[in-house]
Structures are given as C-alpha cells and as structure tokens.
Image: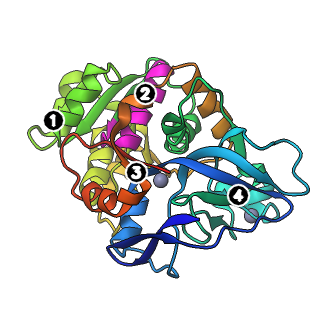
Amino acid sequence: MKALIYTKPNTIIYRETPLPKIKGDEVLIRIKSVGICGTDLHIYRGGMELPTPLIIGHEFSGVIWQVGSQVKKFKKGDRVVAEHVVSCGRCSYCVQGRPNLCAQAQVIGLHRSGALAQYVAVPASLVYPFPKSLSFEEAALIEPLSIAYYAAQEIGFVLDKKVAVIGQGPIGLLVDQVLKAAGAHVIGIDIQDARLQFAARKKWVDKVINSKKQNAADAIRAFTKEGVDITIEAVGQAATAEMSLEITRRHGTVVLLGVFESPASLNLMHLVKKELTVRGSWTCAFAFPQSVELAAQKKVDLMSLISHRYSASEGARAFQEALMYTEGRIKTIINF
Ligand SMILES: [Zn+2]
Ligand SMILES: [Zn+2]
C-alpha cells in the first residue's frame, strides 16, 4: 500500500509500505479522508520522541476492507470512523470507565501505525459506523468533534451559562458549536480577526474578543460584570491559561484543553481567591456515537471547517503548508 511516512523531523515521504496484518479482533479500514491536527504538526516538527519510520494520523474515515475472525458487527464496505486510543481494558482507569486515561494506552498514529495510508488496522471495539448523509471528509472530523463533545459533556449543564472559548482553531470552533447547541452563551477569543469573524458569521459565538487588540478581562467585564461562568482554554500557552483564570467569575470553572508544549507559570492566587475549579480534558471517551449523531443531524457543521484539501501524493506539501498557520486555514484534509 501507499502511505505518508514520517521518517525524521520535517520529513514526510509518500511511498510503498507493507499492508498491515489484522488480528482476530481487528478490522482493516480502507482510508478515505484524514484530518491533520496540531498533534500531527507537533510530531512533524520533531516535538515528540517517537520510533521512526512511522505512519502518523489519527483523525480519519474510511470503509471496512477486511474483518478479523472474531469480528461480528462489521462487513466489507461499511462506512466507519474510529477512536485512536487503544486502551488495555484492565487497568483501574479502564474499569472505572476512563479508557482515555488508561495507564497502558497505545495511540494510533503515535505508538502504532496511523491513518495517513491507504489502510489502517484498528481494534473493532473502537470502530463506529456513520450514515451516508455524512461525507468521508466530514466524518474525518468526528474525532476532533468528539474531543470537543467530551470536554463540554464533562462540564455538565450549560444552558444559559456564559462560556468563553479561548482559541478559535478547529477544536475551539467545534467547542463553540457544541456549547451553542447545548444552549450556552459563547464568547470566542482569539488573536486572528479572520477566525473570530468566521465564528461570528456562522453564529457559533454570541460575542468575539480579539485579545491582541483588547484586554480580554476588560472586554469580558463589559459584557458580564462578574466574569464568565466557564472558560475553555483551547490554545495551550501560559498567557491563555492565565487569561482563563482572570476572566472566569468567582467559583467558576476552567477547562484546559490545549496541548501545552512547555511548562506554564501562572498566578494561582486567582484560583485560590476565586475558588475556581480547574480541570484538564484529555482526548475523549464514550463520545464517538454521540458525535456521529450530532453531525448527522447537522446540529454541528463540520464541512465549513475544511479549508484545505490535498491528495495523498501531495501529503508532504500539505504538512509544510499547514505549518505556516496562515489566516483562512482552519482544517487541512488529505484524501486517499
Ligand atoms: Zn488530533
Ligand atoms: Zn487500561
């Protein structure tokens, strides 16, 4: 099969590689569309120590090509998406229903071969069907939608709550949409006007703040005197984490969803004096079927997020261009 293979920092090569062999409880998926996310770009830049050569990619859709001997619920040709955290099913986190926190997790596209290839092998327990009303490109965004859905679901009831979403990248825009669908007042914060205007035009947010041009805490106070009830940080930087603590009201909640590439130094007196609840949110669990349903019912618009498309043979260029984070680029998709 053909695959896009990460061989060393800043190098991805499109070349022939052996077809993965499946175990009895696995399926082989013929890949159709793959989304590139911040984690993939982080790996590409050499930000993670991983054995090479490696096929990365974990946001994908495709059709079932082959089923293992023990797999009953799928047949060749089924349209499917799949989770990417292969948990052990036995550790204390797995048995408590937190497979995303599994102590022995193997991640597809990190610890085992990923989706930037014509075929990928996945345990059938992680695979979910999706209806024809969703395109393969849209379905490749079910994984990031699940991240947003999981984070929002962990917060609980948000009807009429004022929620700030810091970072209007693909994940932030999906968080906006999920919260909006759940009845929250959403305030989108970013430093790119193009992204803020896009979110506002789509009516995924009620208010936008460009934190480069305006002091976010002042702008929030002008909108809601006490601060927002909840803040979701979807950037992963010290300044935006600090902003989360500043703009949230007393006794409010902060969810850190961004991937921090370096340690952040924060004024924790905000947390102490305001009795904030601060929690992290890591990948997702039990969110795929709900995300498929949300997308199929068009309660969430995935198609509008896809700004750039490439064929598999253009994959190396896709990575180089995605790294530039130019205005107007939201989600990059590679089609196999
Ligand atoms: Zn991702
Ligand atoms: Zn486990």
Q: CA distance from mark 3 to mark 4?
A: 23 Å
Q: CA distance from mark 1 to mark 3?
A: 29 Å
Earlier in the chain: of badge 2 and badge 4, it is 4
Disc 1 marks which residue?
A: 193
Type of residue at label 1? Asp
Disc 2 marks which residue?
A: 177
Q: In which quarter of the view is residue 313 placed?
A: bottom left
Residue 79 vs residue 279, the one in the foreground: 79
- What crowding class fits label 4: few (fewer than 14 Cα within 10 Å), some (14-19), or many (20 or more)? many
Q: Are marks 2 and 4 in contact (CB under 8 Å)?
A: no
Q: CA distance from mark 1 to mark 2?
A: 18 Å
Type of residue at label 3? Ser
Q: What are the residue bounds of the magenta stretch?
A: 165-183
Q: Are marks 1 and 3 in contact (CB under 8 Å)?
A: no
**Going 56% across and 58% down the picture, which residue do you hit?**
115
Q: Is 324 displayed left or right of 181 in the figure?
A: left
Residue 226, how many percent across, how many down? 29, 28
Secondary structure of residue under mark 4: strand
Mark 3 or mark 4, whichever is nearer to me: 3
Disc 4 marks which residue?
A: 122
Secondary structure of residue under mark 1: helix
Q: Are marks 3 and 4 in contact (CB under 8 Å)?
A: no
Disc 3 marks which residue?
A: 311
Height in image: 30 above or below 179? below
Type of residue at label 4? Val
Q: CA distance from mark 2 to mark 3?
A: 28 Å
Residue 11 drawn in magenta: no
Residue 244, how many percent across, how many down? 32, 45
User: Is there any visible trace of residue 94 in the rendered image?
Assistant: yes
